[in-house]
Amino acid sequence: ELKVEQNPLFLSMQEGKNYTIYCNYSTTSDRLYWYRQDPGKSLESLFVLLSNGAVKQEGRLMASLDTKARLSTLHITAAVHDLSATYFCAVDSGAQKLVFGQGTRLTINP
Amino acid sequence: ETGVTQTPRHLVMGMTNKKSLKCEQHLGHNAMYWYKQSAKKPLELMFVYNFKEQTENNSVPSRFSPECPNSSHLFLHLHTLQPEDSALYLCASSQVSGVNYEQYFGPGTRLTVT
């Protein structure tokens, strides 16, 4: 059974700092997705990573995938308050089934 | 309307009520999904429909009954629910082709069972 673990689960950081969220998963997969969720809102797709070594960047966020290590990272550069949200990684376990991590609640303070 | 829409956005129901949640996708996708998001658990997949056919039932209790009349519409019929069923219910859709099954989510229905 595929298990997906994110860490940290809670992250409070200052504006302007850099930090990384980690997503580990337990069985082989080469498709991984990152989503953002604002309070009371739905999930917004951020990145789709489809192969080993894939790297995607959008603004201050960069995501990467290492399928051999079964690890994805979401790196935040020079954080700004607008990035405060909960971030989820989701791993494709086959047959369109996504298994989600617990989510990382990110709070960025001025 | 664009993307994935869900109605109602909020629902309060008693344990003896019967209600339905509705989802509609305007993306031309051919797969639709129901997820449950509880306060302290990861997002849980409930049902998957491909081309209107149910392909996944993730051990969901029978008090939840899905219906997919066509590729654009998905319903979740609810009856005799329990308080622990209170949660955010999210609908999603995706294209089933190629290697990218990126799922697009609706705004969700916040369900409270009293």
Image (tube, coloured by chain):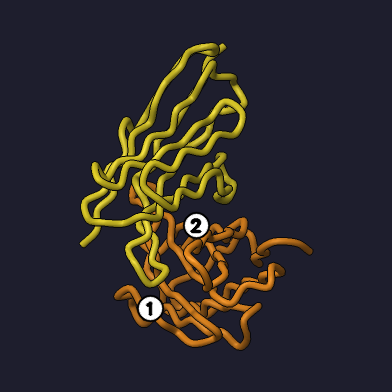
Neighbourhood count class around disc 2 (C-alpha, 10 Å): few under 14, some 14–19, many 20 upward: many
Q: Colour of chain A?
A: yellow
Q: Is residue A67 above or below residue B98?
A: above
Neighbourhood count class around disc 1 (C-alpha, 10 Å): few under 14, some 14–19, many 20 upward: some
Q: Is residue A106 above or below residue B91?
A: above
Q: Amino acid at mark 2?
A: Leu
Q: CA distance from mark 2 to mark 1?
A: 20 Å
Residue A4, horizontal then vertical, whole percent:
28, 49
**Residue under numbered circle 1:** B56
Q: Is residue A104 above or below residue B18?
A: above
> Of tags 2 and 1, which is closer to the observer?
1
Residue lying at 49% horizontally and 87% vertically, measured from the top left: B53
Residue A15, horizontal then vertical, whole percent:
54, 13
Name the one closer to the observer, B20 or B17: B20
Residue B86, horizontal then vertical, whole percent:
43, 60
Name the one closer to the observer, B69 or A74: A74
Residue lying at 47% horizontally and 45% vertically, measured from the top left: A34
Quarter of the figure that contains the N terminus of chain B: bottom right
Q: In the rendered structure, are the residues bearing label 2 and label 1 in contact, judged by CB atoms less than 8 Å apart?
A: no
**Residue under numbered circle 2:** B88
| Chain drawn orange in the picture | B
Residue B52, horizontal then vertical, whole percent:
54, 86
First in sequence: mark 2 vs mark 1: 1
Which mark identifies residue A96? none
Q: Amino acid at mark 1?
A: Glu
